[in-house]
Amino acid sequence: MGLADFGRIDEVIHGRMRLGIMVYLADVDAADFTELKTVLEATQGNLSVHLKKLEEAGYVAITKSFVNNKPLTRIVLTDEGRTAFAAYLEALGGLIGGKG
């Protein structure tokens, strides 16, 4: 373990905003865009860019709809995203505690 885990750190997840998105989504079934924006204290543009990167990696699924004539964007962690996040946490744990 130890530094061998360094190469296993997923660059897509590792950015501060993307990591925040993954942590939040791992704890909830789904989140809407406004909820994520508020919780992460992100601008609309910044959040959009990071969600797109996670979506392109297959880690989140984004659905857009209308509720009471207002747009609603919902984000969920995919199975692939959960697996990647678990691997990320394992690699990070190996870096932090990993002398064994």
Image (cartoon, helix red, strand yellow):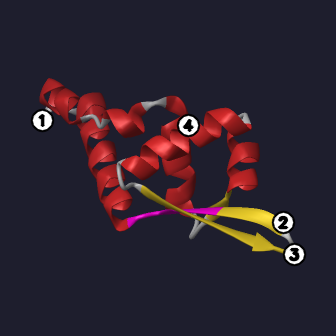
Camera-nearest residue between 22 and 60: 60
Rounded to the nearest whole Å, what is the CA distance between mark 2 and mark 3? 5 Å
- Badge 3 crowding class, 10 Å Cα cut-off, few under 14, some 14 to 19, many 20 or more, is few
Amino acid carrying mark 2 in the image: Lys
Q: Position of residue 8 (x, y in %)?
A: 20, 36
Q: Which residue is mark 2?
A: 70
Residue corresponding to mark 3:
68
Question: Which amino acid, mark 1?
Answer: Gly
* Residues tagged 3 and 1 counted as in contact (Cβ below 8 A): no
Alpha-carbon distance for marks 2 and 4? 22 Å
Q: Is residue 81 left or right of residue 63?
A: left
Q: Check disc 4 and give the amino acid type.
A: Val
**Left or right of residue 42, residue 68 in this image:** right
Q: In the rendering, which numbered label is found on residue 100?
A: 1
Q: Which residue is mark 4?
A: 49
Q: Position of residue 99 (x, y in %)?
A: 16, 29
Q: CA distance from mark 1 to mark 2?
A: 53 Å
> Magenta part mainly helix, strand or loop?
strand
Element carrying mark 4: helix
The residues bearing labels 4 and 3 have C-alpha atoms spaced at a distance of 26 Å
List the single residue furthest toward the right. 68
Quadrant location, the C terminus: top left
Task: Identify whether 52 is placed above or below 4.
Answer: below
| Disc on the earlier residue, 3 or 1 | 3
Instruction: Say whether disc 1 or disc 4 marks the residue closer to the N-terminus.
Output: 4
Disc 2 and disc 4 in contact, CB within 8 angstroms: no
Comes first in the chain, label 2 or label 4: 4
Q: Could you tell me the amino acid type at mark 3?
A: Asn
